[in-house]
Amino acid sequence: EIEGIIMKVNKRSRLKKLAANILFDIIGGFFYSTGIYIFAKNSGFAPGGLSGLALIINHLWRLPIGLTTLILNIPLIIFSFKFLGKSFLIKSVRSMIICNIFIDIIFPYFPSYSGSPVLAALYYGIFLGTGLAIFYMRGSSSGGTDFLTMTIKTIKPYFSIGFVTMSIDLIIISLGWPVFGNIDAVLYGVISTFIASVVIDKIMYRVGAAKMLIIITKHADIVAQKISEVSGRGSTSIRAVGTFTKDEKNVLICACSNSQAYAIKKEAQKIDEKIFIILTDASKIFGEGFVN
């Protein structure tokens, strides 16, 4: 009977998680696609990433931006599969498909911005960075050079993500010079990519900051399993004995992001109504280096 209850709880949890992921994919896809189609499409510059390359191809041959991006992703998906894993790639493909629906089907019914290129670069960076941050926080991505960057990082772990990303983006941004016929296209591309990076860092730092959960419960095994399912993280179990009551309970310690902490607390309280949970910054316990 207990196993049946656990299976039902797990099934509901998976369905809720899937629904939440799709919802955030839609929200992230909206912001991501707004940046590309509304602000970058007719502004005379190519931002970084495969989306920038797709914009160049659209400028030259009028091919659909979303479909072109998806086709360009195919060799990268094949190449990076063994390095990044099935789960991450499936989530990313789902995010990419939703973005392509926005870019090729929905947004063509709306006018794209054709004003100041500087403002276009600024708002492209804000919208694209917000969309990417939403994807990253859900364990997904927009595909493209994200696949290539993470694969290179896996093969060459001593390379920083920033160095790899900037190197790839600069190559694509530089193509805007001969295609659009002026060096301003490169400068606007650099501005847009820089703004997007700043937005991603600001959002990820605030929402994804390292947290530490200390959980006291009599159902440690079930809660530990739920932690793994909800966050994809492990936890440390310690048997604790009260110095006064001599009662034995288990203490679970789990390092996670702020958003993961909320999900873990919510699910853990369903399992044990009398559970005791402490949430604090991981750096306060382990020092600043732990956050990295």
Image: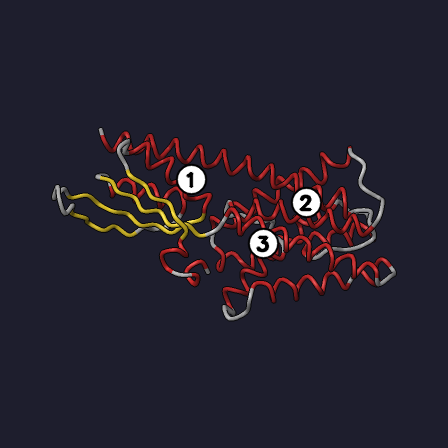
Earlier-in-chain disc, 1 versus 2:
2
Amino acid at the residue labelled 2 = Phe
Q: Position of residue 201 (x, y in %)?
A: 58, 54
In this view, the residue in front, 200 or 63, is 200
Q: Residues within 10 Å of mark 1 (few under 14, many from 20)?
A: some
Labels 2, 3: front one: 3
Q: How is the image coloured?
A: secondary structure
Amino acid at the residue labelled 3 = Asp
> Quick check: marks 1 and 2 in contact, CB under 8 Å?
no
> Quick check: marks 2 and 3 in contact, CB under 8 Å?
no
Q: What is the spatial separation of the Cα atoms under label 2 and label 3, in whole angstroms?
A: 14 Å
Disc 1 target residue:
262
In the displayed structure, 73 sits above or below 95; it is: below
Disc 2 target residue:
127
Helix, strand or loop at label 2? It is: helix
In this view, the residue in front, 191 or 143, is 191
Q: What is the spatial separation of the Cα atoms under label 1 and label 2, in whole angstroms?
A: 26 Å
Earlier-in-chain disc, 1 versus 3:
3
Amino acid at the residue labelled 1 = Tyr
The N terminus lies in which quarter of the figure?
Answer: top left
In this view, the residue in front, 285 or 25, is 285
Disc 3 target residue:
201
